[in-house]
Image (tube, rainbow, N blue to C red):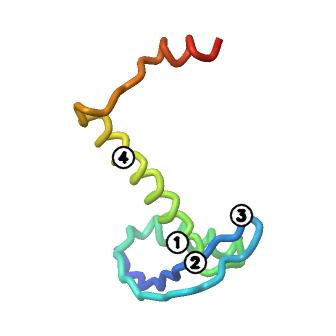
């Protein structure tokens, strides 16, 4: 494994087609397996963007998905949260 030091930038994403606007920066060091480092470097070259761009984008997407998962898990375990059965949802669509 190689040590890769990355700088993550807090960004405001206006749309998927616009460049991100930097607002904050904090350096974070992570250890990545060599195969991920190589793939990241190749991606950065093909996109003509820094590695930080792809890492930040991937981490944002992961955090959104994981936060949704945690909310769903909490709701599933909450005895006071009313769960609507699928058949009732489908019935309401007719």
Q: Which residue is mark 3?
A: 16
**The C terminus: image quadrant:** top right
Q: Earlier in the sequence, mark 2 or mark 3?
A: 2
**The N terminus: image quadrant:** bottom left
Q: Which residue is mark 1?
A: 56
Mark 2 → mark 3, Cα distance in angstroms = 12 Å
Residue 64: x and y, percent? Answer: 47, 56
* Element under disc 4: helix
> In the image, 44: left or right of 28?
right
Residue 87: x and y, percent? Answer: 48, 12
* Element under disc 3: loop
Residue drawn at the location 61% of the way across and 71% of the way down: 42
Task: Give whichever of 51, 85 is nearer the camera.
Answer: 85
Mark 4 → mark 1, Cα distance in angstroms = 22 Å
Please state which of the two labelled residues, at mark 3 or mark 4, is closer to the viewer.
4
Please state which of the two labelled residues, at mark 4 or mark 1, is closer to the viewer.
4
Name the quadrant containing residue 2.
Answer: bottom left
Q: Earlier in the sequence, mark 2 or mark 1?
A: 2
* Element under disc 1: helix
Q: As displayed, is residue 78 above or below residue 5?
A: above
Q: As displayed, is residue 16 above or below residue 85?
A: below
Q: Which residue is mark 2?
A: 11
* Element under disc 2: strand
């Amino acid at each position: 494994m190689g040590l890769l030091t990355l700088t993550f930038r807090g960004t405001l994403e206006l749309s998927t087609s616009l460049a991100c606007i930097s607002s904050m920066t904090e350096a974070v060091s992570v250890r990545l397996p060599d195969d991920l480092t190589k793939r990241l470097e190749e991606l950065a070259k093909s996109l003509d963007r820094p590695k930080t761009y792809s890492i930040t984008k991937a981490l944002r997407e992961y955090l959104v998905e994981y936060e949704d998962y945690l909310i769903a898990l909490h709701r599933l375990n909450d005895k006071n949260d009313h769960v609507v059965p699928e058949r009732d949802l489908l019935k309401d669509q007719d």
